[in-house]
Every structure is written in structure tokens, then in C-alpha cells.
Amino acid sequence: MNKAQAREHVWKDLIKVARPDSRYHFNFNEFIPDFEGSQQATDRLAATDLYREAGMVFITPDNCLEDLRERVLLDGKTQVISTYGIRRGLVELGPGDAPDHLARYAVLLDVMEEAGRYLPLAEIQERGLKFDWMITGASAVNTSGVRFGKGHGFFDLEWAMFYSIGAVDVDTPVIAFVHDCQVVDVEFELSPFDTVCDLIITPTRTIEIDNPQKPTQGVIWDQLEPDMMDEIPLLGELKSMQQD
């Protein structure tokens, strides 16, 4: 079974527990859904030392991570969130950016760009920011920590950009946040771009992965899809930084 087949297989079970998106309904080609039990998965992560000791984290804009983004904000941590498709870059959201009673709204994709502030890659590098961990939803993840999303490769690209500016390194934990039905016991061939997870969090399980692969080559420019440079301005910023 390849990744595309595994994705289709998982979606048949996922639709039974997934929560629809207001724009994409149940079209999992367009978004990573929230699911029944996501609050329990958030509680499971929040009970770990990894969570308690973190100060600056990266969280993808997936629907299943809304509860976590709210918890991070209420707990006084700073989070960096990518905009949908990374098209408008990154948003930094931290303590003081929203009152507690509005925290739930501040972390939503339609509000976070007003509540927070855009964060260029150059500023991340200048401030010497380091992420204590990165977390992402997924379409599916196997028990070896190989995850895959909608098929666009955004998370692997985010890892590559952050690695290039020193915001992450091979010791930075990567967490997959999924429903139990999204964990598959199938082996996949790794590509050089796959960012393997250290930890899988579900509503009922915490799965630790031994020696996960972390790419160290940064962005491989000649391997990008033709339209990515136009659609993701951060890539142009990174290329200029590297040329300078």
C-alpha cells in the first residue's frame, strides 16, 4: 500500500468521526479535519513535560489543532502558526495578544492574522528564535512516525525553511496529532524530504518513535513544484537571505 492508497483507506473511517469544515465540508483533499476526541488528545499532550516546559512552539493551521492553539495561548506560551497553504506566511501569537475570553476566536484561521502579527523568516533568525517542538495534523501516520497530509508537502517544506535558518535542528521534537483511526500499521518508503515524527498523540494513545529521520538539507530549490515560488512568499524571502 502506498501513501495515496493509505490516505484513501483512512478517509473511509475518518469521515465517521471527522467534523466538517465550513468551506470544504468533508473534502479531505483540502483540509485536515477536527475529529471526535481532539480535546482528549489535547489534554494528553498538555500533561507531558514536553508541553509544560515549552515556551515557543510551531503549530500548523489544521482544524484538529484549534483546541491546542487555544490551550497554548491561555497557558502563556508563544506560538507561530502558518497561514493556510503558507500563502501569507507565518503569524506569531503570544501572551497579551487576546484576552482569555476571546482566546478561542483568536486562534481561528479567520481571526489569527488580526490577533497576532506576521513573522518574517529574517526576524526569526535575527531574534534567534528556536521552536521547542513542532506539531501537525495529518491525513495518516504509520507506527514508524511517517506522516502525510493532503499531499502538498507543506509541513516538510516548513521544516526545511526553519532548519535553514536555525529555528529547528535534528533534536527538535515533531509531533503528529491524529485520531486513532489515522494511525496505520503499514510501512512506507521514506523520501529524503519526509520529516518523521518523534511522537504521535491520539485521544487514547501516545506513541514514541525511536530515532526519527529529520531532513538536514534545507530547501532543495530544484525539487520545488513550479508554482510554489509564486504562491509561497517565504520561499522568495529565504532565497534572498541565502543569496545575501
Image: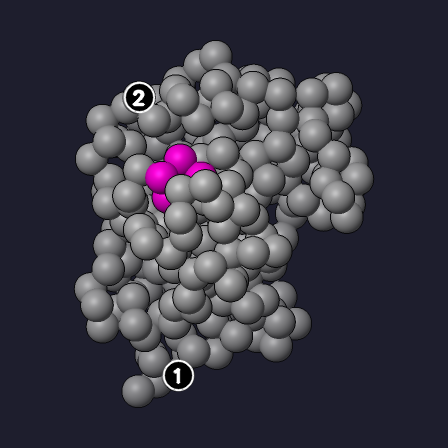
Query: In the picture shown, does residue 37 fall above or below 7?
Result: above
Query: In the picture shown, does residue 219 fall above or below 139?
Result: below
Q: Verify CB contact (< 8 Å) between mark 2 and mark 1.
A: no
Q: x, y percentage for residue 115? A: 46, 59
Query: In the picture shown, does residue 47 fall above or below 118?
Result: above
Q: Residue at x 63, y 26 (%)?
A: 35
Label 2 amino acid? Ala
* Mark 1: few/some/many CA within 10 Å (<14, 14-19, 20+): few
For residue 223, say whether it is visible: no
Tell which circle, 2 or 1, labels the residue nearer the N-terminal end. Answer: 2
Dominant SS in magenta: helix
Residue span colored magenta: 70-74
Q: Secondary structure at mark 1?
A: helix
Q: Which residue is mark 1?
A: 240
Q: Residue at x 49, y 34 (%)?
A: 67
User: Would you say 164 lies left or right of 154 here?
Assistant: left
Q: x, y percentage for residue 42? A: 44, 26
